[in-house]
Amino acid sequence: MSETAKRNFADRFLLPVATFCLFVGGWEATVRLIDISKIVLPPPSAIALAFWNGLLAGDFSWHLAVTLYEILAGFLVGAISGLLLGFLVALVPLAERIFYPYIVAFQTVPKVAIAPIIVIWFGYGVTSKIVITATIAFFPLLANTIMGLRAAPRDQIEMLVSYTASRWQVFRMVRLNQALPYIFVGLDVAIVLSVIGAIVGEFVGAKAGLGYLILQKNFNFDMAGTFAILIILSAIGVGLHALVSLAHRRVVFWMDTAGERVTGA
Amino acid sequence: MPARSDPEPLTTLSRVVPLVAAPATATSTGPRAAAAGKTHESLLRIKGLEKTYATKDGQAIHALHDVSLDIGEAEFISIVGPSGCGKTTLLKILAGILDRSTGEITMRGKSLSGPSRELGVVFQTPVLLPWRTVLQNVLVPVEVQRRERKRFEARAHALLAMVGLNGFEGKYPGELSGGMQQRVGICRALVHDPSFLLMDEPFGALDAMTRESMNEELQRIWAESGKTVLLVTHSIPEAVYLADRVVVMTPRPGRIVDVIPVDLPRPRRLAMHNTPDFGRFVSRIRAHFNSSGTLDA
């Protein structure tokens, strides 16, 4: 290995692993030495054991499937409607005048706060969770699509116009492409928020799902079990984020630095 | 095209796709006639052009004042002037990107308003679309104007070969140097075979060496194609080297103060820059800016 390769390996792999070991080791030692109650803070070893037992017993799989379904369905519904309304508002001036004030007003409402209402409207099943998740995933797409469709540089538009391009041609050949990086940032924010949306929905009232499982374990003072589910939830978040990032890099291949765009949740 | 004795070597392009627009220009006029100072058949006529626009704080800017100019078929016109003299504004109005306040523009006798299929525009920056390959970028006007793609694709290949970019058709703009990108921009302006080429400081961002070879190349393209060129530039030597006539503009408000016919023989060689004749043209133009105290060329 060359010097730089060694340093890269150390930076990208050894450093995070060492930090992780130090953190987990310190946690385990602190809990044992100070003798903190397992109900307050379980040691990592207990969490790992709970995780392993849960996997063996097959406790997680059903709840995991339910929550994943809620996340993905809600994300799709929210993202697609955000995208469509974004196009409408950015391209049809009348639609902007009609919808924009409401969009701005509704955007400031904490979507989590309306979760109880949605559960009353749509019941304790998966539908209410999908609606809550969709509501949360909707706004990042809406905001980024509107901004992206307005982001086309003037010189590119003028270039096309000078060659007698129509409005539609300018849209298809420049605006749409320039909006893509923004739309992907919106997708990235939306997918992470979708995990939150599904869990919050399950907290408010549910019959299955990882959020429901967390509440159940909490009632039984099974803190190690709660932490084990948190690990699964972070893995879901990281995995989905990675998938969106991969698609981002593939589609917006012409930009070196992806992700330097506005968010706007 | 008149049988003029063109001393420049024919490129592959001329053999593959004739760059010359056929019978429309088959008159006794041509670049050679221009150099001899004969009258051109008028292609574009600008009369009493005015442009005033408002800045954000409501101030009125008088960008162009009483600009009148007659541009002949196959003529090469350079416009020089300091920053803010309205030369880019004039070019944008001709390209149909900007509206004029008052005045008349006619092309072959017909009133010109808005963009025209007969124009090819080269901008200060290459303005390539980064998600399109070099070839797809060159074909943008063909696509926009719904021309027969197959025929023009061969032409695009020939143009790229002419500017030394064969083999780069499938590359993306991000993989090209600035000079190469600008050459792609020039190919794009020529691909739909327009009769009139508008160029807005196309070589401003290039280094001196690249710029000189691009000047030579532009002269050759112009001589071979019989196109009319309007070149906006900061550089007085560049203007003199290329033009049949140099139009001198000064700012506040932007207006034409002098039109200087350049009767240096063609084809012009780079070495001509050092001749006394060339120097006389340069100093005559420079005198305008010294007197107005806004020399920046």
Image: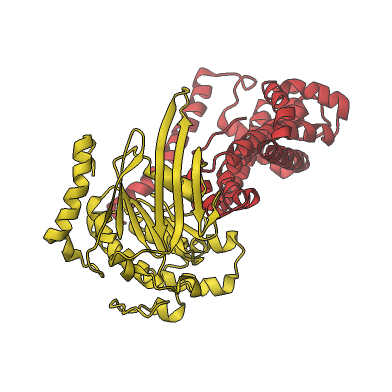
Horizontal placement of A67 versus A234: left or right?
right
- Using the rendered view, name the quadrant where residue A67 is placed: top right
Front residue of A112 and B167: B167
**As drawn, A192 above or below B141:** above
Give the answer, above or below, for where B210 lies relative to B291.
Answer: below
Can you tell which chain is drawn red?
Answer: A
- Residue at 51% across, 47% down: A158
In the image, residue B60 sits, relative to residue A247, either above or below, namely above
Chain identity for the colour yellow used in the image: B
Q: Quadrant of the N terminus of chain B?
A: bottom left
B180 and B254: which one is in front?
B254
Residue B55 left/right relative to A211: left
The percent position of residue B97, horizontal first and vertical second, equals 51, 46
Place of residue B4 in the rendered image (x, y in percent of width and height, measured from the top left): 34, 78
Q: Position of residue B86 (x, y in %)?
A: 38, 40
Residue at image location 21% in from the left, 34% down from the top: B293
